[in-house]
Each structure stands twice: as structure tokens, then as C-alpha cells.
Amino acid sequence: MEFKSEQIINEIINRKEDLIELTQNLIKIPTLNPPGDNYLEICEFLKSRMELSGFNSKLMRAFDTPGDSDKHPRWNLICSRNGGVKGKTVHFNGHTDVVETGKDWTLDPFEGKLIDGFIYGRGACDMKGGIAASIIAAESFISLYPKYPGSIEFSFTADEETGGYGGVAYLANQGLFSPSKVNNVIIPEPLNKDRICLGHRGVWWAEIETFGKIAHGSMPFLGDSAIRHMGEILKEFEDKLYPKLEKIKTKMPVVPDGAKTSTLNINSIHGGEVDHPDDFNGYPAAIVADSCRIIIDRRFLIEENLQNVKKDIYDLLDSIKEKRKNFSYSIRDLHEVIPTMADKNSNLVNQLSNSIRKIIGVDPDYVISPGTYDQKHIERIGKLKNCVAYGPGILDLAHQPDEYIGVEDMLDSAKVMAVSLSELLK
Ligand SMILES: [Zn+2]
């Protein structure tokens, strides 16, 4: 079937006001996560919108996933529209949740104010602007060519910011992303309108605990300080592990440059007496800590494997055991994600690249995200390889105060998505 990209592009230009209003309306629903507010409200808003252009939609609650409760139910919305002729399925996925606002806003984070061509609000760039652009892309295409081959799908999902278990992971477990049903997935996360994000680095979170013996703080020699044992681990990290990680470089096009090596963050440390609330104004007790815990966040590269990533740390801990008296520890896995990278030569990436060249007039950049996003569940649980992130907005603005999205950027990326959609369905 022949689709005219000029016509599609014009149709999108005509919908500029609608795009602005849709983005503002999405921002006005405060879907803060945690705890997961107003998921049903945003799904119902999107449901009525999508039904206007002939989408069938289905609300799905991810019962019993982390955070799901009657007070904060994890609602997701799936929409699909068949063109009436056999063909491929193109699926757009967007997360509806936003992170807390934090302080330092100079504007109302849930007003969606438009100033000089930029819309401000929590979630403007991550990723309500991307959701709005993808909807306008599909609506424009459908209004011109209602009888296309194949099917267009949308999923609006919960909880991406907290791991995606009540959102994309849940839907993937229900078979919604199985390659027999879906051919291509585009996630309009804010990666900039001229960049295609092929995947992300891997993650391993673990908790390490050292053990000691409690005693009176005036006679520490009668006890054994778990904090001093932890100090030795941190020293070994500094002396041996960090220099080693800095040398592990990747061929993955990770942005920013600093993330092209393996990294380790120590997320938190706690030892000894518990932290008291701010309104407690007493003195601490004199004790020797019998336990100290850290959470580590290790990000790894496609060239590494998770087993060896873990073994590095186990070996380091065991080497301390050999030389340090009374050193004992435990280590507990918290979370792991394997690195992923979509095929740069796939039809999906080619079509997006061609559209970027045609509409934006530059060669696209192919990037890898330093952190993970919902693509991990689509690949690992859904077993679908043809998935990338492409959408408007500047990644650095995500989660910041006075987050914003440019209207022209949204229009451009909507054009890229719509023309790519027409090519992928052809
Ligand atoms: Zn996001």
C-alpha cells in the first residue's frame, strides 16, 4: 500500500494545538510514583481519547505486583486498532508514571504551562510529551489511511520509574509482547529527536553485610566493630575494584561518555545504632556496631557476564577473609538485569533512521542508555528483540525541577514516528 509521507507530515503540523493540549492534559493528572497515584484516572483519560480514532481498549490491573493495593492499584491500558487488512503490528509503549517533584520548582509542576514554545511540568519530557507525540503520530496516520494493513497498538503502563513490574513486566508475562503478536515496539522515552536508543547496560544490585560483636563504646576492645570491617571492604573497592572497572571499556555506544566503562555506586551505608527521626533530640548510645550494611549498584557492559561481575566481588570479599581476623560477611542479591542492544540493521531501526534523515535532516545517533528502562522486560520476558526507544525531549531534564518539553521537538518526533509507522506497516 502506498502512503504519502508529505501528507502525513502536513497532517501532523495541522494538529499542533491538539498536541500541546494533549500534553498539558496528561501533565495535569499527577501520576506520582511512588506511591502510584491516579493510574486509573490517566488510563480512563487515554481510553476515551484512543476510542475516538477507533482503538479498542482494555484496562488491566497488575494485581499483587510490588506496590499494588486497593489504595494504589497498578492500572495499565492496552489499545489496539486493526486496519482491516492482514499485516504487521507496530506497538507504542509509554509509561504514565512520573517521579516526585522535589523542591526548587519555579512553576506549578502539574499545570503544564506553555511558555515560548516549551511546556513545563513533571513528566513533560519523561515521558508524557513522548506519549502525546506518539498518539498524534498514530491519529494523523489513521485519519489519512484508516484501512492500512496490520495493526497499531498502544500500551500505557505503570511503574516504569520503580522497575516496571506492575506495568510492562506484567503485560509481558501475559504474552502481550510475544513476537507472534507484535513485530516492532517503539518506546518514546526522551532520547532526543535525532537519536535512537538501542538498549541499555546491565544491572546488579546486592546488599553486603559485615558482622561484629556488640559491646560498650568505652571498651571497644571487648567487642568487634562491623563498621571497621566494612571500612576494609570500601578500602579494597578503592584500591583494587574501582581501578579495574575503569579499564573495562565497551563498544556499546553508551551516552554519556562516562558510562562507557563499568561502574559501581555504593547506594547506601548503614551501621550501628538506627537513625533517629528528626524530632528526636536525645544523645546516641555508646555501642560497638555488630552489623554494617551497604547496597551496591553495579552497572555492567555487554562484553561482561553477570557471573564474572559477581565473582569479582565474591573474590574480593574472600581475600579480606583470609587476611583479616574475625571478618565475616553475607551477600544478598537484590536485582539483576542483563544488558541489551537491539540490532542496528533491523527493519525497525532502518525505518526510524530513514525518517530522521528525511525529516530532521541529520544522520541519527545510535545510543545505549546508562540505566535501564522497560525495554528489558519486552526483551527478557516478552522475547521480542525489535524494540527501541525513540522520542522527543532531552534526557538530562528527566527528573529535574522545571522539567520541560519543546513543542517543535514533539512535532518533529511525531513526524518521524508517523512516517516510520507507515513504512513498517507497508
Ligand atoms: Zn521515562
Image: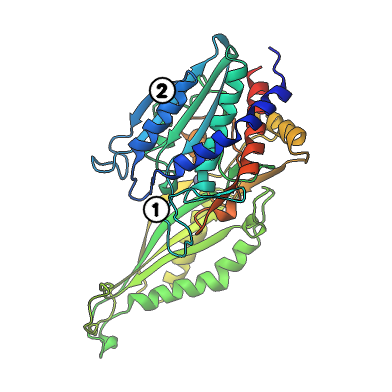
* Mark 2 residue type: Ser
User: Which label was assigned to residue 192?
Assistant: none
Q: Residues within 10 Å of mark 2 (few under 14, many from 20)?
A: many
In-image side of 169 versus 139 (left or right): left
Residue at x 45%, y 61% (from the top left corner): 296
Residue 122 in picture, x, y percent from top left = 47, 51
Q: Nearer the viewer, residue 130 or 198?
A: 130
Q: In which image quadrant can residue 133 be found? A: top right
In-image side of 400 versus 227 (left or right): right
* Mark 1 residue type: Asp
Residue at x 71%, y 14% (from the top left corner): 2
Alpha carbons under labels 2 and 1: distance apart: 38 Å
Give the label, 2 or 1, closer to the camera.
2
Is label 2 in contact with label 1 (beta carbons under 8 Å)? no
| Residue 19 in sight in this render | yes
**Which quadrant does the N terminus fall into?**
top right
- Please, which colouring scheme is shown? rainbow
Q: In which image quadrant can residue 292 be found? A: bottom left
State whether residue 316 is above or below residue 193: below
**Which quadrant does the C terminus fall into?**
top right
Q: Nearer the viewer, residue 69 or 306?
A: 69
Residue at x 25%, y 85% (from the top left corner): 222
In-image side of 92 versus 45 (left or right): right
The residue that mark 1 highlights is 333
The residue that mark 2 highlights is 57
Residue 291 in picture, x, y percent from top left = 30, 71
Q: Nearer the viewer, residue 113 or 249?
A: 113
